[in-house]
Amino acid sequence: TYRRAVNATPLDYRPRVGLAGALAALGRSDEAIEEYRHVAQMERSPAGAWVALARLTVYRNLTRPAAARQWAEVGRLLAEAGRAVPDS
């Protein structure tokens, strides 16, 4: 399973990205966000992880009352995605 792979190779972002994607597909977006945040803190994190994190943050924002939405966070995450892409 992805959790076993994450535990076996904690410095490899790929199993954690798989786990985050599986959690998102199951509708467990808060857990998926947490996993993508772990990936984002890893050295050489892939831009796709930042984009997925931004996408899930948009989804979470849309489920909250307007006053509780954090759109600046989405912008920050997309900026990080841009920095993760070489020559961008």
Image: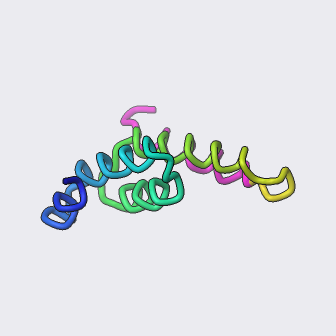
Give the farthest residue toward the front: 26
Side of 4 where 56 appears, left or right: right
**Residue depicted at x 65% and y 45%:** 75
Up/down of 46 relative to 42, above or below: above
- Asked whether 76 or 2 is in front, the reply is 2
**Closest to the observer, 59 or 83:** 59
Residue appearing at x 40%, y 32% in the figure: 87
Q: Which quadrant of the structure image shows residue 56?
A: top right
Judged by its main secondary structure, the magenta piece is helix
How many labels were placed on the picture? Answer: 0
Q: Which of the two residues, 54 or 2, is positioned nearer the viewer here?
A: 2
Compared to residue 68, the image places residue 85 above or below, namely: above
Instruction: State which region is magenta.
Output: 70-88
Q: Residue furthest left?
A: 8
Magenta stretch holds residue 75: yes
Task: Give residue 72's position: percent from left, percent from top.
Answer: 71, 51
Reply yes or no: does residue 71 show up in magenta: yes
Q: Can you give x and y, in whole percent of width and height, for residue 81 in the image?
A: 48, 42
Q: Position of residue 28 (x, y in %)?
A: 49, 53
User: Which of the 4 image quadrants contains residue 46?
Assistant: top left
Is 68 placed left or right of 74 in the picture?
A: right
Q: Residue furthest top?
A: 88
Residue at image position (36%, 45%) is 22
Figure coloring: rainbow
